[in-house]
Image (cartoon, rainbow, N blue to C red):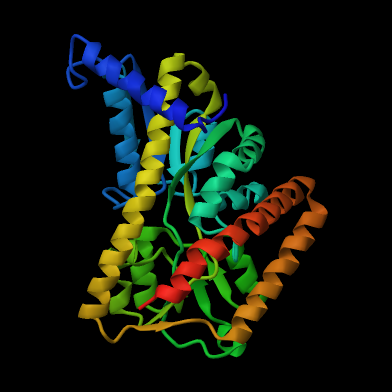
């Protein structure tokens, strides 16, 4: 199985779904599904944007298949294992999952690269790498070992650096700081003295409010407004750790092989459309919600980490990457592939988007 990467393939699959709908004798709502799948997601019930991407995907599958296939969505409230989604899909307990690849770093460090990496690619660069720069093939190699397929599942774009109870003026301010931050960034900060933890979404507000943690990163205004962090933490830092956070759809390989070819195409197409729609939605909602926060909560202070802190983060990040690559051939292969592609893509970013923005920001 290979992921659809060409616009032509996407169009054919969409048209295929349309033909099935128009040509069928019954509507999708009336058809009895031949294939009933279940999807486990890391997110709570009715979780905006992330959960909406999953719902959109399932609805498209049902519609394009003319009701032949239906996907039931179980939130973490039902399955009770937000960080167990990979294991459940791997075991066949669920045919599909929706989560973030870097949550599995304890099982397989090579999964980190397919969400985001500190000081790495921004979303357009990362999407280009996935679909045209070899990223999908590298991701398949990693997830083949787990018996699942992984597909890009929606991008948040550049994430904010987090909400802090106290201002960070020096490296000393990081020492002993208790912070929720996942992925490779957590390892970087732990080297600088931060006490790193990972807490499920539903527990974050209470942990920050009660002082269980001193700071947290979540996403950005698109989701942070609903979480209410601006009510209890006055400092909002710009990002460095997740410049292009891509979620993932997981699919059990054996279960996928049981689907007819046209349903395989429909599932892949629905995934791709839902993922890109989430990227656009996330960007829009961040713009809208930041306008609300800045107007209704003028006490919120936007900060950028001091140059010496950023320099230390970059140095520690580079050191950790090189040390891990020296011990793991697969890690090295993906790391070098991303580094080479980013170097190439960044030259274009510099003379296109960056050059335009730096001269035209009001």
Task: Give the image location of residue 274, x and y in percent.
Answer: 36, 40
Q: In this picture, is 239 found above or below 174?
A: above
Along the viewing direction, whichever of 28 and 227 lies nearer the viewer: 28
Task: Give the image location of residue 244, x and y in percent.
Answer: 50, 57
Along the viewing direction, whichever of 5 and 320 lies nearer the viewer: 5
Task: Give the image location of residue 143, x and y in percent.
Answer: 61, 37
Task: Give the image location of residue 326, x and y in percent.
Answer: 82, 56
Q: Quadrant of the C terminus?
A: bottom left
Q: Quadrant of the N terminus?
A: top right
Instruction: Give the left or right position of residue 173, taking residue 188 as reference.
Output: left
- Does residue 43 appear in the picture of this structure? no
Q: Point out the residue furthest to the top here.
A: 25
Q: Residue at x 40, y 44 (%)?
A: 276
Q: Residue at x 75, y 68 (%)?
A: 319
Instruction: Give the left or right position of residue 226, taking residue 349 as reference.
Output: left
Name the quadrant containing residue 149: top right
Q: Residue at x 30, y 45 (%)?
A: 52
Instruction: Give the left or right position of residue 212, taking residue 140 as reference.
Output: left
Name the quadrant containing residue 315: bottom right
Instruction: Give the left or right position of residue 12, taking residue 290 as reference.
Output: right
């Amino acid at each position: 199985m290979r992921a659809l990467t060409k616009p032509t393939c996407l169009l054919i699959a969409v048209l295929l779904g349309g033909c099935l709908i128009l040509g069928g004798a019954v509507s999708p709502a009336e058809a009895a599904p031949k294939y009933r799948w279940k999807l486990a997601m890391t997110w709570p019930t009715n979780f905006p944007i992330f959960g909406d991407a999953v719902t959109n995907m399932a609805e498209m599958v049902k519609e394009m298949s003319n009701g032949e296939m239906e996907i039931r969505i179980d939130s973490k409230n039902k399955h009770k294992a937000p960080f167990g989604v990979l294991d459940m899909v791997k075991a066949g307990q669920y045919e599909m999952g929706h989560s973030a690849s870097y949550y599995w770093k304890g099982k397989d460090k090579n999964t980190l690269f397919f969400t985001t990496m500190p000081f790495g690619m921004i979303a357009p660069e990362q999407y280009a790498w996935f679909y045209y720069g070899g990223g999908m093939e590298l991701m398949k190699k990693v997830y083949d070992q787990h018996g699942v397929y992984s597909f890009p599942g929606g991008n948040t774009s550049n994430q904010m650096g987090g909400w802090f109870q106290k201002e960070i003026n020096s490296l000393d301010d990081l020492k002993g700081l208790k912070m929720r931050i996942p992925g490779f960034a957590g390892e970087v900060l732990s080297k600088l003295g931060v006490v790193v933890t990972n807490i499920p979404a539903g527990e974050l507000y209470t942990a920050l409010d009660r002082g269980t943690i001193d700071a947290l990163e979540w996403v950005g205004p698109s989701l942070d407004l609903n979480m209410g962090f601006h009510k209890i933490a006055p400092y909002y830092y710009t990002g460095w750790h997740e410049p292009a956070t891509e979620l993932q759809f997981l699919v059990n390989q054996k279960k996928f092989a049981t689907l007819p070819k046209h349903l395989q195409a429909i599932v892949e197409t629905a995934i791709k459309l839902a993922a890109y729609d989430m990227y656009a939605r996330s960007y829009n909602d961040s713009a809208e919600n930041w306008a609300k926060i800045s107007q209704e909560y003028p006490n919120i202070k936007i900060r950028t980490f001091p140059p010496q802190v950023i320099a230390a983060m970059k140095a520690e990040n580079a050191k950790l990457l090189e040390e891990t690559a020296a011990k793991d051939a697969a890690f090295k292969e993906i790391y070098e592939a991303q580094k080479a592609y980013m170097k190439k893509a960044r030259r274009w970013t510099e003379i296109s988007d960056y050059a335009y923005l730096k001269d035209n920001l009001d």
